[in-house]
Image: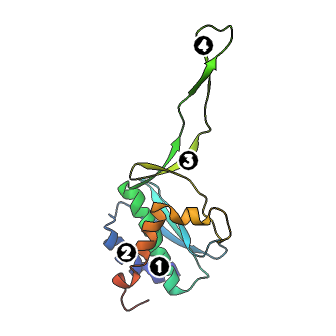
Amino acid sequence: MVRDYNGYIRVIRQDLQLPETCRVVVTMHHNFKTRGGYARYNAGGISLICLNRTTDHAWNVAALMHEFRHIWQYHTGILKYVWRIPQAKLVGMIPGAGRFYKVTREKPEWVHLWNGVEYQKYNRASYPEHPNFRKYLACPWEVDAREYENEIHRLFPCSV
């Protein structure tokens, strides 16, 4: 079934100017919580795009564009997913310990960097009633991917 999308994949990769060294495997599954799909970037390795098999053709082409845009964001370095370990914080002197200070650390966490600006990681919210749904959609990498996805008729004027 993915074979049916090879022509679209070539056009999208060419439009995004993704080099052949940025290898991506596209798969399809049928029991998704979300309607579209997801992308996993692996620098220097093989990245993955997984689409929902139960959606229609036009939706899958738009989802391909959206997920390839995320691969492009990571590949170009505009979007990074990093493990942030906060700096130790001074909270006071330990009594009787002289010059030693008690320090605490915030919990390490995964964060997104968009053009060098740190953003909190929101789990993908699969339904509009979820408290993080609007926050997730407002993330700049999601806004950018949706804008690119909306260019479907520029890339494929007659076929979807």
Q: Are marks 4 and 3 in contact (CB under 8 Å)?
A: no
- The residue beneath circle 4 is 100
Q: Nearer the viewer, mark 2 or mark 4?
A: 4
Q: Which of the image's four quarters has the C terminus?
A: bottom left
Point 57% across, 28% down: residue: 89
- Between the C-alphas of marks 2 and 3, the distance is 29 Å
Mark 4–mark 1 distance (CA, rounded to whole Å): 58 Å
Q: 17 or 139: nearer the eye? A: 139
Secondary structure of the residue carrying numbered label 1: helix
Q: Earlier in the sequence, mark 1 or mark 2?
A: 2
Element type where label 3 sits in the image: strand
Residues packed near mark 2 inside 10 Å, few (<14), some (14 to 19) or many (20 plus): many
Residue 13 higher or lower than 99, as above or below: below
* Image depth: mark 4 or mark 1 in front: 4
Which mark is on residue 110?
A: 3
Q: Dot 1 corresponds to which residue?
A: 62
Which scheme is used to colour this image of the protein?
A: rainbow
Please tell me how crowded label 1 is: few (under 14), some (14-19), or many (20+) other residues with Cα within 10 Å.
many
Against 88, residue 110 (above or below) is: below
Please say if 35 is above or below 21: below
Which tag, 2 or 3, sits closer to the chain's start? 2
In the picture of the structure, the residue carrying the numbered disc 2 is 12
Three-letter residue code for mark 2: Ile
Name the amino acid type tagged 4: Phe
CB atoms of marks 4 and 1 within 8 Å = no
Separation of marks 3 and 1 at Cα, in angstroms: 28 Å
Image side of residue 124 versus residue 10, left or right: right
Label whose residue precedes the other's in the sequence (4 or 3)? 4
Q: Earlier in the sequence, mark 4 or mark 1?
A: 1
- 62 vs 15, left or right, is right
Q: Secondary structure at mark 4?
A: loop
